């Protein structure tokens, strides 16, 4: 299955928090979108692997993505080496996306920055035909996405561009709240974590509102780029 967009997250819920509004909008426009989670988030303070697997499935249905896979890398301990790069190269060649979305280039959680660089490096390497990979016993063709964009997470990084997600904030928040073990629940008996407070949950929506305010719309999601953006004319800019 060829996808238009493939979004990577170091943990289940990274993609939902970072760019699910954009994903929902692109799907509404007829684009085929997939999600690849690097780990199961097994070191998370709250919940369990089984719970998060179930939550991930629910979020996937809410967003309506075409496919979602998990690479079962070690939460907290995956590294940017050949073995891990090859796992991602296989996914890139399997789905042949034009656009890749991935973790923030730097962030509070060490897996986010690591995941960002790992995916970015693999996107480049995936275009080298002398790197051989197979899927289900068949050789894969080299494939390099046209662009890699990084969504913004905990740290308030300056975006290079903002996507208007007006009309999709409710889907974004619903997909996030599918991970009920992770986020604010006044009745939860789980230990508190940096993302379990009401303030954090409110901040997700507030950030979208603030980015929207800056670009003159209701809600937005910010991204950073690896190379200059190109436009055909000044009228393409808003």
Image: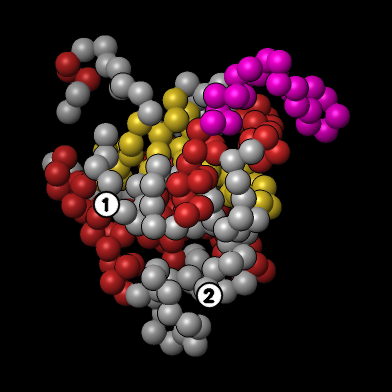
Secondary structure at badge 1 equals loop
Residue placed under numbered mark 2 in the picture: 46
Question: Residue 230, percent across and down?
Answer: 30, 17
Q: Residue at x 43, y 74 (%)?
A: 193
Q: Residue at x 35, y 31 (%)?
A: 225
Secondary structure at badge 2 equals loop
Check if residue 137 falls in the magenta segment. yes
Residue placed under numbered mark 1 in the picture: 156
Mark 2–mark 1 distance (CA, rounded to whole Å): 24 Å
Task: Establish if 90 lies above or below 125.
Answer: below
Residue 162, quarter of the rendered image? top left
Question: Residue 29, percent across and down?
Answer: 41, 33
Q: Quick check: 140 left or right of 235?
A: right
Instruction: Please report whichever mark, 2 or 1, sits nearer to the chain's N-terminal start.
Output: 2
Question: Residue 175, percent across and down?
Answer: 45, 58
Number of marks in picture: 2
């Amino acid at each position: 299955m060829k996808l238009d967009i493939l979004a990577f997250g170091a943990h289940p819920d990274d993609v939902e928090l970072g760019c699910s509004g954009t994903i929902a909008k692109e799907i509404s426009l007829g684009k085929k979108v997939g999600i690849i989670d690097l780990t199961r988030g097994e070191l998370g303070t709250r919940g369990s692997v089984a719970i998060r697997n179930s939550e991930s499935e629910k979020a996937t249905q809410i967003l309506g993505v075409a496919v979602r896979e998990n690479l079962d890398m070690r939460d907290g301990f995956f590294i940017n080496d050949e073995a891990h790069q090859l796992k991602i190269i296989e996914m890139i060649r399997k789905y042949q996306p034009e656009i890749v979305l991935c973790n923030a280039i730097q962030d509070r959680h060490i897996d986010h920055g690591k995941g960002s660089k790992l995916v970015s490096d693999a996107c480049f390497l995936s275009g080298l035909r002398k790197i051989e990979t197979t899927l289900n016993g068949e050789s894969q063709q080299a494939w390099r996405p046209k662009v890699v964009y990084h969504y913004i997470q905990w740290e308030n990084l300056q975006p290079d561009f903002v996507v208007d997600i007006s009309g999709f904030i409710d889907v974004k928040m619903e997909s996030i709240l599918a991970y009920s073990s992770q986020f604010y629940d006044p009745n939860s008996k789980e230990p508190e974590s940096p993302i379990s407070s009401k303030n954090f949950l409110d901040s997700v929506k507030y950030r979208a509102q603030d980015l929207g305010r800056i670009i003159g719309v209701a809600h937005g999601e910010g991204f950073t780029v690896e190379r200059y953006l190109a436009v055909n004319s000044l009228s393409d800019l808003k």
